[in-house]
Amino acid sequence: MKRLLAAAAAASLLLLSACGSSDDKSSSAGGTTKVTFGYIGDYNGSSLIAIADDQKLWAKHGIEASTKVFTTGPLQVTAMNAGDLDFGYIGPGAIWEGAAGNAKIIAMNSLGNADRVIAQPGITDLSQLKGKKIGVPEGTSGDMILTLALKKAGLTAKDIQRVPMDAPTIVTAFDSGQIDAAGIWYPLINTIKAKKPNLVELAKDDDFSDTASFPTAFIASNKTGADTDETTKVVQVLREAMDYRAAHPDETAQLVASLTKQPLDAVKADAANSTMLDTKTADGYTTDGTFNKWLTALGQYFLDAGKIKANTDPSTYYLGNVFTGAASK
C-alpha cells in the first residue's frame, strides 16, 4: 500500500510539473514559448505578422504564436492589462500608452503617413470644421491628426461636436452622413471612398512633418516586457521580418493581402502611405538617439493634449537595448 501511495504521489507531482503554473508559458516540447500577439489589419500593423507566419519565423526562434486582429492600439493595451495579450502593435496616436507606463515599446516599425482628417463634400477648409460633428477613435492616430489639424486652424475640441466612436463605426457613420468629418486612417478611408468618392482630405501626417515624426511600433505588456529572454525571441522574429519586408516588398504585399483579405492594389496603396524601417536603420536610430527624440516630441504633444501627466523619458518605455541586443543572439 505504501508503494502504491508513493507511486500515486509521484504521478501527481509529474502531472503538476507538466502542467506548470499559470505563469509558465513554455510548452513541454522543446521549450517552445507560447505568446499571444495582437495586430491591426493594415499594412503597417500586419506586414511583419504575415511574413513571420509565411516564413515560419515563430518556430525558428522557439515561439508558438497565437495572433488576433484588433481595430486600434489602445484596445490591445486594454487586453494586455487584462492579461489576455502579451504583444501587440500601435500606431503613432497610441504611443502615449508607452509614455503613460501602460506598455513597453519593443521595436519601431515604420514612419506613418496614413492618417487623415476627412470631411463630407462641400467642406473645403479646416476652419469650416467649427461647429461640425466629427467622429474620432479616442487615443488613436485619428485622434492625434484631428487635434493637430484643429490647432493648425486655431480651433480646439470645444469648437466642434466631438463624437468618440470606434474606427469601423466611423466608416458607417461617415457613409450615412451622421458625421460631417472624421479623424481616421488608410486603408479604412479607401472603404469610405468606395461610397463617398468625393470626400475631402483636409489634413495628413505629412502636414506636420516639420515638427513631429509619426512612428508605428510593436509593444509588450509591462509583465511580458520584463521577461528579457521571451521579448528577445519575439524581437528576433520582428527583426528578421523587417529585413524580409525591405528586400521583398511585392511578396510582402501579397502576404498582407492574403492575411487581411484585401485587394492587392489596396494593400500596395496602403503601403505607399508609410516608410518602412529595416533593422540597419532602426539600430542606427536607436543608438544615435533619433527614436528618443521622436518619442520626446510626441510626448510633448500628448502632454499638451492631456493624454499623459508627464513627458516621460523614452528610455523608460522604449526597450532599445533589447531591440539592438537581439541582433547578436
Image: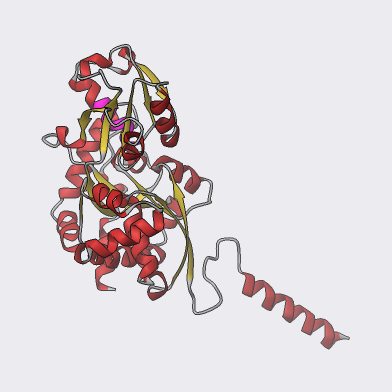
Q: Which of 275 and 85 is in front in this view?
A: 275
Question: What residue sits 24% from the left and 48% below the top?
Answer: 269
Q: Quadrant of residue 276?
A: bottom left
Q: Residue furthest left?
A: 210
Question: What residue sits 23% from the left and 37% below the top?
Answer: 298
Q: In which quarter of the image is residue 205?
A: top left
Question: What residue sits 26% from the left and 33% below the top?
Answer: 116
Q: In this view, does 318 lie above or below 213?
A: below
Question: What residue sits 37% from the left and 51% below the top?
Answer: 262
Q: Which of 255 and 139 is in front in this view?
A: 255
Q: Where is residue 167 in the image (x, y as percent from the top left)?
A: 41, 35
> Can residue 42 be seen from the camera position used here?
yes
Instruction: Tell how many labels.
Output: 0
Q: Is residue 132 above or below residue 20?
A: above
Q: Position of residue 38 (x, y in %)?
A: 43, 52
Q: Which of 34 and 268 is in front in this view?
A: 268
Most prominent secondary structure in the magenta stretch? helix
Region of the chain picked out in magenta, as a range: 140-148
Q: Position of residue 9 (x, y in %)?
A: 76, 78
